[in-house]
Image (spheres, rainbow, N blue to C red):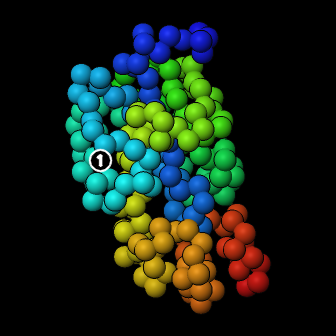
Amino acid sequence: MQLGLDFTLVEELVAGVDEVGRGPLCGAVVTAAVILDPARPILGLNDSKKLTEARRELLFDEIREKALSWCIARAEVEEIDQLNILHATMLAMQRAVAGLHITPRLALIDGNRCPQLAVPSAAVVKGDSKVPAIAAASILAKVSRDREMQVLDRQYPGYGIAGHKGYPTAVHLEALQRLGPTPVHRRSFGPVRRLLEQS
């Protein structure tokens, strides 16, 4: 099937796909795929980074309730270290689309490249602020990953994971230097790799 599809014909079965967590030094990369229901509109969908935490939490529940189909998927730290972050992200996106219980006619992927999928796909740069289904996917992925960071923060106190979500902030880098990497740190990422090489 070609990508010159008539969007008016397929809008009911377009999956939006997005990821969260490519840049952090720890934790999984989390993806989501969402097929919205045109008969049950959701107001206020936007790039998850442009919404407040409270708004994301409300939309998280509403998307899961109203969407025709949704799936949250991931690639683990070990897969990131084995494959590299790009390939791990593509794998997690494949899992999200494969996990939908309705097969989409088209998958719109946030960014500038598409994973290999069993359905036609197209990349949409800044898609999370242009395509409602991608915005919905970005919200599911972000809320899901942020909740995981709260859990990791309790498992590995002292790193401030709940605050920086694993990103390489000054607080995180200082804690890494002081406490060393945890099992959930990405060993292939520069700051963590250099610490391991020193020790």
Q: Nearer the viewer, residue 21 or 132?
A: 132
Left/right placement of residue 129 relative to residue 168 reads left
Q: Specify few, some or many for label 1: CA neighbours under 10 Å numbering under 14, 14-19, or 20 or more.
A: many
Position of 110 relative to 173 (above/below): above
From where the camera sits, is residue 156 visible?
yes
Left/right placement of residue 84 relative to residue 16 reads right
From where the camera sits, is residue 96 visible?
no
Left/right placement of residue 190 relative to residue 117 reads right
Position of 173 relative to 78 (above/below): below
Residue at the farthest bottom position: 178
Quadrant placement of the C terminus: bottom right
Q: Nearer the viewer, residue 173 or 187?
A: 173
The residue labelled by disc 1 is 60
Q: Nearer the viewer, residue 105 or 95?
A: 105
Secondary structure type for disc 1: helix
Can you give x and y, in whole percent of width and height, for residue 70 in the image?
A: 35, 34
Q: Give me the residue at 24% from left, 41% from top.
A: 62
Position of 135 relative to 164 (above/below): above
Q: Nearer the viewer, residue 77 or 16?
A: 16
Q: Give me the residue at 28% from left, 46% from top.
A: 59
Can you give x and y, in whole percent of width and height, for residue 119 in the image?
A: 54, 20
Q: Give me the residue at 32% from left, 53% from top.
A: 56
Q: Amino acid at mark 1?
A: Phe
Left/right placement of residue 28 relative to residue 136 reads right
Can you give x and y, in whole percent of width and height, for residue 184 in the image?
A: 53, 67
Q: Give me the residue at 51% from left, 26% from top.
A: 107
